[in-house]
Image (cartoon, grey):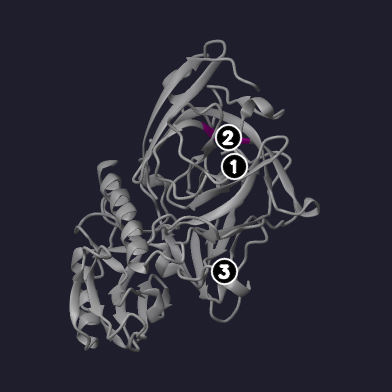
Amino acid sequence: MASLAVLVFLICATLASGSASVRVGLTRIHADPGIPASQLVRDALRRDMHRHRHRSAGRALAAADGAAATTVSARTRKDLPNGGEYLMTLAIGTPPVAYPAIADTGSDLIWTQCAPCGGQCFRQPALLYNPASSTTFVVLPCNSSLSMCVGALAGAAPPPGCACMYNQTYGTGWTAGIQGSETFTFGAAAADQARVPGIAFGCSNASSDDWNGSAGLVGLGRGALSLVSQLGAGRFSYCLTPFQDTNSTSTLLLGPSASLDGTGVRSTPFVASPGKAPMSTYYYLNLTGISLGTTALPISPNAFSLNADGSGGLIIDSGTTITSLANAAYQQVRAAVKSLVTLPAIDGSDSTGLDLCFALPSPTSAPPAMPSMTLHFDGADMVLPAESYMISGSGVWCLAMRSQMDGAMSTLGNYQQQNMHILYDVRKETLSFAPAKCSTL
C-alpha cells in the first residue's frame, strides 16, 4: 500500500499527555462466507488499482528505548469484513488498548484512530484509543527527528506548545491527525508481552472509510517512522496463510528472532531505493524473467528495471493484494497461461476485475492442473504453485495478476506471497524466502 503524499502543519496545542525481538500475530482480512470470491478479488483489485494510480502520481532513525529482548506472541482473529490485506494486532497506551492494524511494507507511518473523533472516522472493530486516558501519551515535539514537521522548521526553534498535524494520503484513502509518542505493547499473554515506550505514531481524528476492518495501519517500510526502523529491528519476517484460509493465522517477527534457514531458502539482494519519497520507502527487487513450467517466457531482462528518474522497478508489498506486471511482461504471462488452458476463456473485468478468466463447468468444479510459475530474481528463483497465481470462485478461474503500464512500477502482491516464509534483512540488504505451510509455523 503506497504512502503517497503528506501535508503537515505546525500548530500550538495542549493535549493529554534496545533492539527488540517482537512476535506479532497476523490475520488476513477475509470475506464473510456468503461473499463470492469474485467479489473479494474485485474489491481487492479496486484498492490495488487506486494504490498504483496514486503511486505513479506521487513521484514525502531512532531505536526505541527499553525494548524487550524476548520474542512474544499476539492473539489474532478472523471475523473481519472482506478484503485482501493482512492484519497485525498490537496495543497502544497505558493502560494498553488493543487494536488490529494493516501490516504494510509499502509505507512508514504507524497510526490509529483517536478519540475525540468528530464525524469523520470509520467504524472499527476495537475500542477507540483516547490519548487523554493514557498516562504515557505525549505530543511529539516538532523538532524531534521523527517529526513530519521538522523540515518546515528549517532548523529554527519550534514555538511553545508546537504540535505537528499531518494529512497522509494513500492509494486507498487518507488519514489526518496529530503526531504523538506512546508506549506500544506486543504480545497477548501478560508473561510474554513486550512494552516499547517512545514510539512515534499518528493519532488520527479524521479518516476516509477505506480501511477494511482495521483500526489503522503499521508501516513496515524503509523510512525512519516505520515500526521496523523505530524498533531498530534490523530484520523481520512473515509467513502469510493462504488467501482463502479463513481459520489459520500467520506470524510477523521483528528483530533477532526473525530468521530463515534450511535447504530450500533462496536469497536475492534488494535494489537500492531512490532517495526521493515515496520511492525511498519501498523494497525493490531485481526480477529478470518469468517461466511457466519449464518454458522461459520471452520477457526482456530490463522489463522491470528501476530507472534513474525513479520510474519502473518492482517492489514487494504486503499491503497490495494482486501482483501487477509491466504490460509487456504481463502480456507474455497472459498468453502463456491461456495457451495451456482448454476451458472457455472469458473477460472477468466486470465480475472480478481480472481480464483473463476461464469458465469452469460448474461452480463446484475443480480447476485443471497447471504447472508452477517461476519468478527469476537476481540469484534466486521464487516458485509459485498454481494456487498462488490462479484464483477460482463462483464458477470462474482467473489469472491473479494484472497489467501495469510500461515504465510504471510493478508490484509483487501478497496473493503471490501466500505460503511463502519471507525474511527482510534490512542490514544485509537481502530478501530471503522459502516455501512453507504457514498455518503450521
Q: Which residue is mark 2?
A: 200
Element carrying mark 3: loop
Task: Identify the magenta region.
Answer: 199-203
Q: Which residue is mark 3?
A: 247
Give the quadrant of the C terminus: bottom right
**Image-based side of 50 in relation to 30, left or right:** left
Question: What whole-number distance in Å separates the C-alpha atoms at marks 3 and 1?
Answer: 32 Å
Residue 128 visible at all = yes
Q: Nearer the viewer, residue 292 or 27?
A: 27
Q: Which mark's residue is nearer the viewer, 3 or 1?
A: 3
Q: Which mark's residue is nearer the viewer, 2 or 1?
A: 2
Establish if 203 lies above or below 341: above
Establish if 425 lies above or below 301: above
User: Can you name the residue that lies furthest to the front here?
Assistant: 34
Looking at numbered disc 2 in the image, what kind of residue is underneath it? Ala
Establish if 370 lies above or below 47: below
Q: Nearer the viewer, residue 330 or 280?
A: 330
Q: Residues within 10 Å of mark 2 (few under 14, many from 20)?
A: many
Looking at numbered disc 3 in the image, what kind of residue is underneath it? Asn
**Image-based side of 261 in relation to 298, left or right:** right
Question: What whole-number distance in Å separates the C-alpha atoms at marks 2 and 1?
Answer: 8 Å
Q: Which residue is mark 1?
A: 230
**Image-based side of 371 in relation to 204, left or right:** left
Residue under the point 37% across and 67% down = 36
